Image (tube, helix red, strand yellow):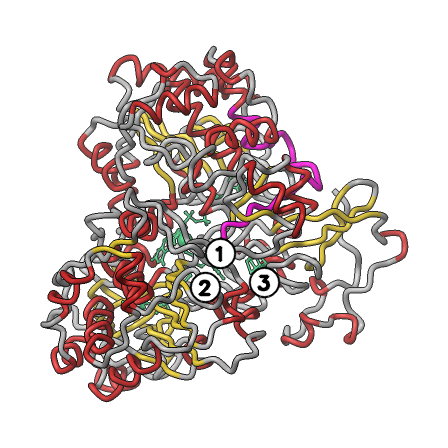
Amino acid sequence: MMKLPAMTLREWDGPLTADLVREPARFGLGQVPAHLLPDAATKAVCGFCSTGCGLKVHLKDGAAVNLTPDPDYPVNIGTACPKGWEALSVLDAPDRARMPLLHGKEVDWDTALKYFCDQMRAVLDKHGPEAAAFISTGQIMFEEMAFLGALTKFGLGMIHGDGNTRQCMATAVTAYKESFGFDAPPFTYADFEESDVLVFIGANPCIAHPIMWQRVLRNKRNPQIIVVDPRATETAMAATQHYAIKPKSDLALLYGIAHLIIRDGGVDTSFVEEHTTGFDEFEKFLADYHPARVSEETGISVHRLVHFAQTIIHGTLRVSFWWTMGVNQGHQATRTAQAIINLALMTGNIGKPGTGANSITGQCNAMGSRLFSNTTNLLGGHDFRNPRHREKVAAATGIPVQRIPDRPSLAYDQILKAADEGTVKALWFVATNPSHSWIDQNEINRILDKLDFIVVQDMYCSTETAKRAHLVLPAAGWGEKDGCFINSERRIGYSPKVRRAPGQALADFHIFRLIAHYWGCEDLFRAWSTPEAVFRVLQRCTEGQPCDISGIAGHEMVQKSSGVQWPLSKDDAAKFKATTWKERRLFEDGKFYTPDKRAKFVFEAPQAIPEQRSTEYPLVLITGRGTSAQWHTETRTGKSAVLAKMIPQELMLDLHPNDAAPLGIREGMPVRVISKRAELTAKARLTTCVRPGEVFLPMHDPRVNQLTHASFDPHSRQPSYKHSAVRVEK
Ligand SMILES: Nc1nc2c(c(=O)[nH]1)N[C@H]1C(S)=C(S)[C@@H](COP(=O)(O)OP(=O)(O)OC[C@H]3O[C@@H](n4cnc5c(=O)[nH]c(N)nc54)[C@H](O)[C@@H]3O)O[C@H]1N2
Ligand SMILES: Nc1nc2c(c(=O)[nH]1)N[C@H]1C(S)=C(S)[C@@H](COP(=O)(O)OP(=O)(O)OC[C@H]3O[C@@H](n4cnc5c(=O)[nH]c(N)nc54)[C@H](O)[C@@H]3O)O[C@H]1N2
Ligand code: SF4
Ligand SMILES: [Mo]
């Protein structure tokens, strides 16, 4: 691989200021020696978060030497966050998986693939189709993801397989399906710029989606920005109104706001009558959510509740609602997401510029995984249980219909439970690191250690999960293979291969093709020869669905049009050509995807928090993203010298001074954080950004999920990562 030029940010060992990162040339850095000047550039979308920024990758002799944000891409308009800037350098890490590893020893691909097939076949033959499962991701291309789901279920004959999107997006999926009739985030990023009021609930875009936040900063309407978050985050500090609610009291808050909107005559009655069902029942239900009760339950004064409601009341203002993990990760997450949807519906804030009930996704391909992972939905947002859907997908893919299972997969936590009970014997993890990221980590690791066969397919051989695997399959990463991601605003973006993977690492796509061959089911996948060929197969699967993409003329059109938002049916294609649609939102005609075309008000009384504070564990532990330079379990971002300068060197516990004082804890002291399940040591950071009685830890440290309490939303089965009881000691 080409070495990066001298005098880059990587060699700079002084402090990294924002100015320096933005304009390295001003500081004499970032200049590229002549012999390394690129001779060409190609366009790619970033492979970290769901913002889906466009990057220009500069090539020398056909291989990537550097990258810059793409000024013409409609998502990021020439900006990128630190992770995007560093996307190439993390590919060179010494712990890249270069060869297959069998029980820790390097073997050739032939040995590895034979072993994979022998072990999987033994498990499935002896214990039946439910005994092996895969756990996938929102971080590989959707053509690869679809191949994995199709290979395992139609080829290998598995029933179960879920994704780490369960940790992340399952709640939004479940909420949208029930309320709108399809998993359909309605917005486009232009809505950030076109709102008069933006309401962020359980979202910290300054850290987690900094380039979306850049779009908010471009809003010229002098917007009100409301943030609902127990913590005074970077986003809350930039807001005009911050509601620091008691953790997990969002449902009461949102019902309380709905109550006040009705009381004060702020309902868009014509929208509600023409386009929704269930409002009358909702109104009756809300009678109990009077401000005094809601104030008590949320910790927000009556006066401020009224102010909140007045800000979003139906009138001439455009209000958009945005939510992320503070909502999706909770014990009543689905109903909370739907309470946000209800507010948008009752104030008529949907289908118009600057409005919407908008779930922001997490990983680069979270949306692609929702449509095409073949886990809980059959390819293209279909239902495994529906015989007509199975026939349709069989016809579109050329797979015999009897090979398509007639039921969806168990959810992630149910697969693990089955593994604990001994009915699941083998697990195949692709592009996810649950030994670090799954809730109540000691428990998952205990279960993994019981399994007969664990396969991990990853870019790095050193991940916590890879260390537990019997077989590690070395995978190419972003930039080393091609295919498409779908971002938060439903934009399909293309990412090309711009360099070779190290050693014998292969694109996930090629690993799946090889497994099909070694298994002896390659005939089923004759048409699945390249990512683009799979794109074509998937297009056929979506025909007639809300996510219809049959009008896209292949990868080239995706790349040349700066991405294409779904839907784009064959009928839409002509319009797209004529107008070069850049930004589109859903529901402009007020028609939803339910059978009666109306959106549904869904609601339910709040439930008690599963793990309450107690005298022994008097503090609530909140977890989430730490900095914009850290990505999840840090397998990738942890390898960048530039990013390393932007993050705390030790694990920091955010603790309120009022809680610290009686414990004799001062700034910077090492402290023990103890839950019922485990304990860890961190450095105390005394701050009023957390409320008294609450502490915060970033999820990036491998020990944090040892503390978390495993509870799940009953509808989405998404883990509730953000509420566990702990105590802190000196
Ligand atoms: N730098 C960076 N960016 C990322 C990622 C990353 O790892 N690093 N990951 C990506 C992924 S996959 C995702 S899903 C997104 C996540 O993006 P976000 O959801 O924005 O990030 P989090 O920090 O997990 O959680 C958001 C906020 O929820 C708040 N919160 C906790 N409990 C509650 C509650 O009960 N109510 C409310 N209202 N708020 C609460 C937390 O205090 C936190 O500030 O980020 C994406 N972007
Ligand atoms: N306490 C707490 N825990 C959390 C959360 C929280 O807020 N709090 N958030 C949750 C959320 S929202 C999420 S999304 C999860 C994320 O959890 P994970 O998905 O487990 O985290 P990552 O570190 O992104 O793991 C992705 C893995 O895929 C590998 N990889 C990257 N690209 C490729 C590729 O192209 N091919 C292959 N084969 N491998 C690749 C990486 O090296 C890495 O090991 O964490 C969840 N865990
Ligand atoms: S905001 Fe997300 S998509 Fe954009 S550069 Fe950063 S990590 Fe990549
Ligand atoms: Mo996520």
Name which residue lies at 41% across and 24% down.
393
Q: Earlier in the sequence, mark 2 or mark 1?
A: 2
Q: Quadrant of the C terminus?
A: bottom left
Q: Is mark 1 within 8 Å of ligand 3?
A: no
Does residue 607 appear in this view? yes
In the picture of the structure, the residue carrying the numbered disc 3 is 643
Residue 423 as seen in the image, left or right of residue 522 = left
- Real-space Cα distance between discs 3 and 1? 35 Å
Label 1: few (<14), some (14–19) or many (≥20) C-alpha neighbours in 10 Å:
many
- Real-space Cα distance between discs 2 and 3? 39 Å
Relative depth, front residue between 66 and 716? 716
Is the Cβ of the residue at disc 2 closer than 8 Å to that at disc 1? yes
Name which residue lies at 59% across and 47% down.
564
Q: Which residues are magenta?
A: 488-512
Q: Can you say whether 252 is above or below 381 in the image?
A: below
Identify the amino acid type marked 1: Arg
Q: Quadrant of the N terminus?
A: top right
Residue sticking out furthest to the right: 34
Residue 176 as seen in the image, left or right of residue 648 = left
Please give the label number shown on residue 585: 1
Q: Earlier in the sequence, mark 3 or mark 1?
A: 1
Residue 151 as seen in the image, left or right of residue 677 = right
Relative depth, front residue between 715 and 553? 553
